[in-house]
Image (spheres, rainbow, N blue to C red):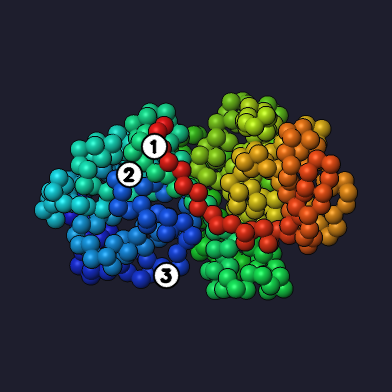
Amino acid sequence: MESIKLEEFNHWWMKKEVDSELALPFKRTIYSEIKENLDNKFILSLTGLRRIGKTTLMYQLIDSLLKKKISAENILFFSFDEMNVKISEVLDLYKEFQKKDFREEKVYVFLDEIQKCANWENELKKYYDLYPKLKFIITGSESLFIKKKTKESLAGRMLEFMLSTFSFKEFLRFKEISDSDFKYETKIKPFFIEFVENGGFPETFNLDSKKYFEYLRALVVDKIIFRDIPKSFNLDDPEFLKNILAMISCNPGMYIDYQSLGKQFGKDRRVVKNYIFYLKESFLISLLGNYRKGTTTLRKNKRAYPNDTGLTKLHKISIDELMFSKMVENIFVIFLKANAFWKEKLEVDIVKDNLPIEVKYRERIDSEDFNSLREFMKKFNKKKGILITKNESETRSFEEGEIELIPAWKYLLKNEEGVLFSSRGE
């Protein structure tokens, strides 16, 4: 690799600022939390789907460092998306080109799509341990920590930030809707419908219908299915992988039975299980396990959801009332970062922090719509449940406890996304 490649990636060395089209003005909710951790020792890891703003967030962080008068030459950015090189090659070339001593100078190292770099975890560990003044910020479009050895080698060294596609609140702010207008249903509801139908990929928000579908197909689905996953996991049938994704996208919340899916597609159940695992680890889908006595099990009764409702729109030609309600449920799975539902005779859509949440996006709520929440509350001795509605807003008291009815659009504006996960102490 030649030094000109570093110059191309790091234009601020000469311009002393980040190009405005790279460090976009809109900042995700999680940005401030990540920025607050720029000066601690831990490696910062940003993971999530392609095209949700991880690289943009990196450029924004670089811009913030430059505005703090950090020397431009002490900020290094490199992307492994298109180049097959080692971390050591990048750092050695940078050190020679900029005449840096890693033991003496604080250097911020931004490494994009690091999962494409062979043996990245061990190289990163070596530099982290040898050079305390190096600050690493990395991104990955696949789960970086699926291998046990990776967790072990980086335990106690990393803070992981999991990014989803845009939340509804971020979508509204992107559309320049002020927080003071969030209380007006007549203003917010049309945006809610648009958000549910189109999803939260930020680069699609201003695209017409044709370009919207082209974008999701070419830059998200096909790039992950036919390039990223085969390269990382060595699979031999990406078309089958694409078919599974389409099936889940068209049926958000579907139950996963590896045996029956294997018969349906003429595949061994282990192959089906592996391929669904690849989709999950590439952040294309989420799997929810059945809640049992305060824990979640993924061994059976799994439910699968696409990780953005745009994937449903991409694969489903028409969205009727029933499909829209399923997509609303899907939005809440994404928003809450849910990993559990509950099913025995009755079923609760989501269990989050032991709180049962049922989605009933319909014109009228009937008495039987409370049955599954009440059964859960009785069985697990919980005194509160949440019923997500289309319009109704009230609290109802039952023998088991209280159930709060909240319109979907309003609930999505209650909390911000951006949960910080730490590997410290693992």
Q: At x 13% / y 49%, what residue is drawn? A: 104
Front-lying residue, 220 or 396: 396
Q: Is residue 102 left or right of residue 275?
A: left
Q: CA distance from mark 1 to mark 2?
A: 9 Å
- Residue furthest to the right in view is 367
Q: At x 43% / y 41%, what residue is drawn? A: 422
Circle 3 sits in a helix, a strand or a loop, which is it? loop
> Could you tell me if residue 372 is visible in this image?
no
User: Percent position (x, y) of residue 286?
Assistant: 59, 42
Q: Is residue 106 left or right of residue 218?
A: left
Above or below for 179 versus 416? below
User: Percent position (x, y) of residue 288?
Assistant: 64, 38
Mark 1 or 2 closer to N-term? 2
- Which amino acid type is shown beneath numbered disc 2? Phe
Q: Residues within 10 Å of mark 1 (few under 14, many from 20)?
A: few
> Could you tell me if residue 405 is visible in this image?
yes
User: Percent position (x, y) of residue 154?
Assistant: 35, 35
- Which amino acid type is shown beneath numbered disc 3? Pro
Q: At x 32% / y 65%, what residue is drawn? A: 63
Q: Which residue, given by chain and number where applicable, does mark 1 sit on?
A: 424
Q: Which residue, given by chain and number where applicable, does mark 2 sit on?
A: 42
Mark 2 or 3 closer to N-term? 3
Mark number displayed over residue 118: none
How many numbered marks appear? 3
- Residues at discs 1 and 2 in contact (Cβ within 8 Å): yes
- Which amino acid type is shown beneath numbered disc 1? Arg
Q: CA distance from mark 2 to mark 3?
A: 26 Å
Q: Residues within 10 Å of mark 2 (few under 14, many from 20)?
A: many
Circle 2 sits in a helix, a strand or a loop, which is it? loop
Mark number displayed over residue 25: 3
Circle 1 sits in a helix, a strand or a loop, which is it? loop
Which quarter of the rendered picture does the C terminus lie within?
top left
